[in-house]
Amino acid sequence: MDELIGILQEIRPEFEFRESQDFLADGMLDSLDIVTLVAALDKRYRISIRGVEIVPENFRNLETLAALLRKYGVSA
Amino acid sequence: MNLRFTGKKISALVTVLPSRETRFEDEMGNFGFSRAKSMKLKLVMGFDRHRLAGEGTCASDLCLHGLKRLFEAGELRPEEIDALLFVSQSPDHLIPATSNLIQGRAGLGRNTFCLDINQGCAGFVIGLVQAFLMLESGLWRKVVLMNGDTLSHRVGKRDRNIFPMVGDAGSVAVVENDPSGPPIHAVVYMDGSRSGVLQIPAGGARMPSTAATAVEEDVGDGNLRSKDHFFMDGPAVFNFVQTEVPPMIGELLAAAGATKEEVEYFLFHQPNRFMLEKLADALEVPRDRMPNNIVENFGNASSASIPTAIAFNLGAALRERKVRVCLGGFGVGLTWAALLMDLGPMRICELTNYGCDD
């Protein structure tokens, strides 16, 4: 999980991602941050997150993100 | 709907770009992001340079310039043009039709059938389908298809959803009969119930432009735009494209009895690099067979983006040989449409510049 938090903080260094259960509602990620995050995750884990899975529900918090990555065989 | 045509071809293609070029790095201060975030977006989305028409330049000017280029090159004579289609969301005026204005300025005959089509990102495919249908009637032999937009004039300069990617361009394709041509397959879908995700709210009869509609405001997404400006719900559009386009391409290939490997290039509308990479991955097509270099070099010029991609990426090849392509457009309407056809060889397939009055 630390690595995932590190990737998130590369994108938005001003936030503490462990403290939020809803990054979007709390204003920590916007839609363009999600695009940047997907590109970073794709590169880091050598995967390609499917376009249809780039929806808000998968990017709400650390648990939903970890669940998304597990679909690609990545344990974050 | 599935459509099949025989004996049709594009015999010439010119894409006209305004000569004025601006750069994302010079504009990113308008978008309210940190430099670091903007530079990441530049890399992922492909924001870099874009061509923007001067204030006095209309889409019709770009298209007329392309038409004159074809006349000058001896590729086409005015009297040969049976029909003129102008696909655009940037008409010169609400009345009259811009195609009529172009007919008059180009000195075309009174027998030329002129028609404006209000379509956006799928407009090149829709325009080709319309041209094929007209040729199919047997009444016409040459249809000139123009696709042009100067939407940069209707985008808020501080709207980070749209301004970094927008570009202006016009294209002119000559579409005619080719008895020896192989079948052309098309798939077209439209869904007006979702039209609100891409819209210019004010300026028509439903909401006339007023002083109030010209006021820029933040409606909660951090972007500054007015109701006179083009609005795009980015996440909704992204989801629409990723959900609808891959099955449409599968349907097209199945209808044609073709495989992905038989298609040399997938030339799609190009809103940004990221969207195209995700489409290529979803279709399991190598990314280099789905070029995504138009936004970074010229910007997204709506229905002119596919002809820009054809001329920029395949211009030299198409002057020499035939290339089997899948064309795909998706956006305003909502409309999504695709064509499987052969392009080339054609004597003229090129990009040219238009000097703007700026």
Image (cartoon, grey):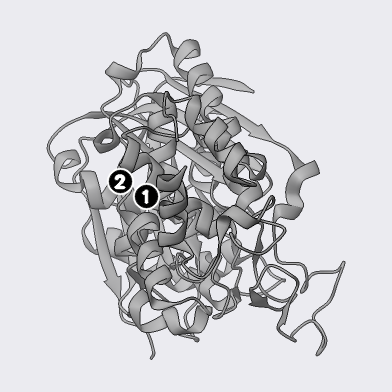
Residue that lies at the very extreme toward the right in this rendered image: B206
Q: Position of residue B327 (x, y in %)?
A: 41, 35
- Residue B80 visible: no
Residue at 32%, 42% in the rendered image: A44
- Residue B204 vs B355, above or below: the answer is above
Disc 2 marks which residue? Answer: B310
CB under 8 Å between discs 2 and 1: yes
Disc 1 marks which residue? Answer: B307
Q: Position of residue B340 (x, y in %)?
A: 41, 25
Position of B312 with respect to B8 (left or right) is left
Residue that lies at the very extreme toward the top in this rendered image: B257
- Residue B211 vs B352, above or below: the answer is below
Q: Secondary structure at mark 1?
A: helix
Question: Which part of the image, by quadrant, shows the N terminus of chain B?
Answer: top right
What amino acid type is highlighted by mark number 2? Ile
Residue at 65%, 68% in the rendered image: B230
Residue B200 in which image quadrant = bottom right
Near mark 1 (Cα within 10 A), the count class, few <14, some 14-19 or many ≥20, is many
Position of B266 with respect to B188 (left or right) is left
Question: Label 1 marks which chain's residue?
Answer: B
Question: Which part of the image, by quadrant, shows the C terminus of chain B?
Answer: bottom left
- Residue B220 vs A62, above or below: the answer is below
What amino acid type is highlighted by mark number 1? Pro
On whether disc 2 and disc 1 are found on a single subunit, the reply is yes
The answer to which of B274 and A54 lies nearer the viewer is A54
- Residue B10 vs B40, above or below: the answer is above
The answer to which of A8 and B265 lies nearer the viewer is A8
Residue at 69%, 69% in the rendered image: B96
Q: CA distance from mark 2 to mark 1?
A: 5 Å
- Residue B27 visible: yes
Near mark 2 (Cα within 10 A), the count class, few <14, some 14-19 or many ≥20, is many
Q: Position of residue A5 (x, y in %)?
A: 47, 51
